[in-house]
Image (tube, helix red, strand yellow):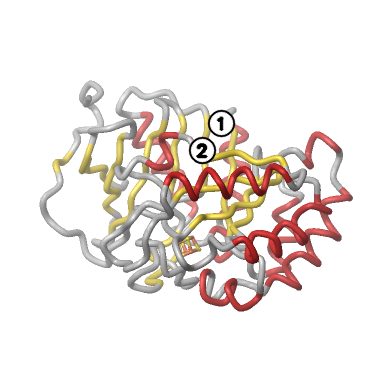
């Protein structure tokens, strides 16, 4: 059984260090009281330059048991987990245990969702049709040049959108609403009007929602967030094109567990406070 060590409980989110049996650690975050973001790998091979999770590369995937135990350990604190998202440390399509984990969540009446950078593409084809409650594909670019910088070891845009154009029309209308594209706004990387227009041209024919995420600065990256004014201007440009766009919710821009802030370590580092999962909830 893994251990949970609570590192921070300030702000909107409760962020847990998850100690694994081999001494490695990942993190999980409880949002809005009942939505749990779990990690699926110790590190990540995709290497997005804005993200702390993959800053040290990939050590190993988590087992199905380790995925399940993140949920069980938080429930053991007395929390009710209604939704799970595989959006923490790691690329879900690089871990073959994730489809079984989604099925396990469903059996427990927990609505599961996931966020992916899109590759390998054969796994993306399958994942679109899994019984998830939401699949968000991180695109973050409109041109191939920017895509290669923002998602360095993810699929290029042309083959990625080819898969989406093939598979999304095969879904029912209600299932199509479960698919979304993500665009994380990073200053001087992907925030120009030309980049947005190139993204719009690719995204609009799909008819899916777009999540425009604000970037959370992390110590492992020199990249910067766009200003609030620029972020709102990007939102207006995407919306004016006819795309259905959502901005980041407060939980996602919370420095405590927001997008891109979770970390993994091959060996557990000190300084965290251990939670006794049998005790009453820690607040
Ligand atoms: S954003 Fe996702 S895919 Fe990219 S490095 Fe971070 S965990 Fe990996």
The percent coordinates of residue 218 (x first, y second) are: 31, 58
Check contact, mark 1 vs mark 2: CB within 8 A.
yes
Residues 60 and 86: in front is 86
Relative height, residue 75 to residue 280 (above, below): below
Relative height, residue 32 to residue 208 (above, below): above
Residue at the image point whose x is 49% and y is 50% from the top? 230
Residue beneath label 2, please?
Answer: 84
Q: Determine whether the beta carbon of the residue marked 1 sits less than 8 angstroms from the nearest atom of ligand 1.
A: no
- Does residue 239 appear left or right of residue 3 in this picture? right
Spatial separation of the CA atoms under disc 1 and disc 2: 7 Å
Mark 1, residues whose alpha carbon is within 10 Å: few (<14), some, or many (≥20)? some
Residue at the image point whose x is 33% and y is 56% from the top? 217
- Does residue 171 appear left or right of residue 11 in this picture? right
The percent coordinates of residue 79 (x first, y second) are: 37, 24
Relative height, residue 1 to residue 282 (above, below): below
The percent coordinates of residue 101 (x first, y second) are: 56, 47
Q: Quadrant of the C terminus?
A: top left
Q: Residue extending furthest left?
A: 271
Q: Helix or strand or loop: what does disc 1 sit on?
A: loop
Question: Residue 110: which disc?
Answer: 1
Q: Helix or strand or loop: what does disc 2 sit on?
A: strand
Residue at the image point whose x is 41% and y is 57% from the top? 89
The percent coordinates of residue 272 (x first, y second) are: 15, 47
- Does residue 261 appear left or right of residue 84 in this picture? left
Residues 108 and 93: in front is 93
Relative height, residue 86 to residue 281 (above, below): below
């Amino acid at each position: 059984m893994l251990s949970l060590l609570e590192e921070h409980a300030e702000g909107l989110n409760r962020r847990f260090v998850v100690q694994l049996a081999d001494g490695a650690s990942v993190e999980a975050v409880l949002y809005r009281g009942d939505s749990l973001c779990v990690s699926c790998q110790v590190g990540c091979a995709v290497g997005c330059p804005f993200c702390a999770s993959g800053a040290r590369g990939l050590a190993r995937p988590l087992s199905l048991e380790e995925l399940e135990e993140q949920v069980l350990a938080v429930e053991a604190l007395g929390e009710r987990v209604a939704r799970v998202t595989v959006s923490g440390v790691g690329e879900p399509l690089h871990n073959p245990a994730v489809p079984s984990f989604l099925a396990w969540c469903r059996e427990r009446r927990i609505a599961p969702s996931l966020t992916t950078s899109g590759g390998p593409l054969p796994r993306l084809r399958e994942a679109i049709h899994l019984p998830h409650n939401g699949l968000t594909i991180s695109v973050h670019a409109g041109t191939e040049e920017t895509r290669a910088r923002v998602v360095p070891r993810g699929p290029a845009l042309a083959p990625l959108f080819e898969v989406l154009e093939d598979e999304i029309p095969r879904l029912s209308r209600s299932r199509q609403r479960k698919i979304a594209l993500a665009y994380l706004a990073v200053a001087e990387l992907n925030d120009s009007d030309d980049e947005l227009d190139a993204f719009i041209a690719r995204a609009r024919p799909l008819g899916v929602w777009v999540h425009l995420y604000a970037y959370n600065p992390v110590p492992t990256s020199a990249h910067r967030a766009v200003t609030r004014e620029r972020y709102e201007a990007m939102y207006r440009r995407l919306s004016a094109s006819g795309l259905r766009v959502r901005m980041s919710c407060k939980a996602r821009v919370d420095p405590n567990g927001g997008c891109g802030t979770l970390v993994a370590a091959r060996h557990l580092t000190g300084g965290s406070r251990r939670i006794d999962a049998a005790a009453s909830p820690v607040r």
